[in-house]
Image (tube, rainbow, N blue to C red):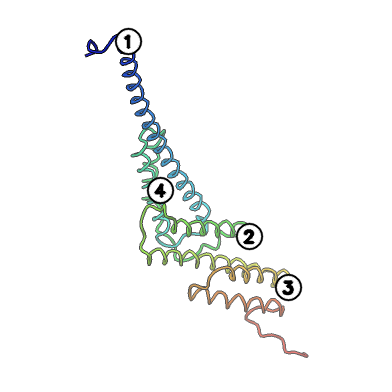
Amino acid sequence: MLDLIPDHLRLFAVIGGLLLLLLLVGSLAQKYEQYMAAKRLAVQRLMVGVQQIEEALEKSRGGGLPSGVGKLLRNELLARYITIRQVFPRKPHISQQVVQAEERARTEPEGSTSVNSAAITSVDSLNRYVIGLNEIYGLLDSQTFGRKLAVSERAALQLKLIDFQLTAASRYYTKVALDYAQTGEWQNAARAARALDSFLLTRPRSSALASQLRNESRELLQAMHDQRLPNEQPAEAGR
């Protein structure tokens, strides 16, 4: 076919064809790079979620999780690792990570009906526990959470998370206040009672338990100000 092209245009035609071929190959290479970049970004986002879930579980493990929450998060981790393996099968150690996630999902405890108060021995451990529960609360609301929870199921789990926070704070600060009261350190006792009252005020009164604990907190605070134990009657004026 090139024989039909004049000599002075033949080289131009050949070069033009090569340029067109290079342009096509370059376009395909660019699209492939874009495809691989999109895969890497997807895996990166999945791994960020994995880290957030692992950290939230670690922070909240001591005080315990409401029934069903730990299993839900472990299954979410497993789903993320499986997805990563499907998207990027050559990712180092991904098959081993899937196996580990399967085992942890299988052995994760069903959860508790109450807070493990013995694990919360300081303000730092209480704050760490509360932060962990807060992070789980937010994860359940996240648009990136794999399992689609029904509105009622999500609300029920989040209510349990709030109640566990309130219970943990109430038990810790009440114990601290009463320990100080037993030794006559009423100023420190009142400070602990105020800390509890302030904490409860920052949480919604979303359940019967929340209202109950808030009432008990007010009674404790008043008792500490009166320099008496909560079950004791106030001293009569003028006596």
Disc 1, disc 4: CB below 8 Å?
no
Foreground: 38 or 162?
38
Disc 3, disc 1: CB below 8 Å?
no
Which of the marked residues, 3 or 1, is nearer the chain's N terminus?
Answer: 1
Q: Amino acid at mark 2?
A: Val
Which of the marked residues, 3 or 2, is nearer the chain's N terminus?
Answer: 2
Question: Quarter of the image containing the C terminus?
Answer: bottom right
Q: Amino acid at mark 4?
A: Leu
Which residue is identified by label 4? 77
Q: Amino acid at mark 3?
A: Trp
Which of the marked residues, 1 or 4, is nearer the chain's N terminus?
Answer: 1
Label placed on residue 186 = 3
- Mark 3 to mark 1: distance in Å? 105 Å
Disc 3, disc 2: CB below 8 Å?
no
Q: Is residue 200 left or right of residue 110?
A: right
Say above or below: 31 vs 227. above
SS for callout 3: helix
SS for callout 4: helix
- Density class for disc 1 (Cα within 10 Å; few <14, some 14-19, many ≥20) is few
- Mark 3 to mark 2: distance in Å? 19 Å
Which residue is identified by label 2? 123
Q: Is residue 239 left or right of residue 140?
A: right
Residue 33 screen position, x and y as percent: 40, 31
SS for callout 2: helix
Which of the marked residues, 2 or 4, is nearer the chain's N terminus?
Answer: 4
- Mark 1 to mark 4: distance in Å? 66 Å
Residue in the picture at 21% in, 14% down: 1
Which of the marked residues, 3 or 4, is nearer the chain's N terminus?
Answer: 4
Q: Amino acid at mark 1?
A: His
Which residue is identified by label 1? 8
SS for callout 1: helix
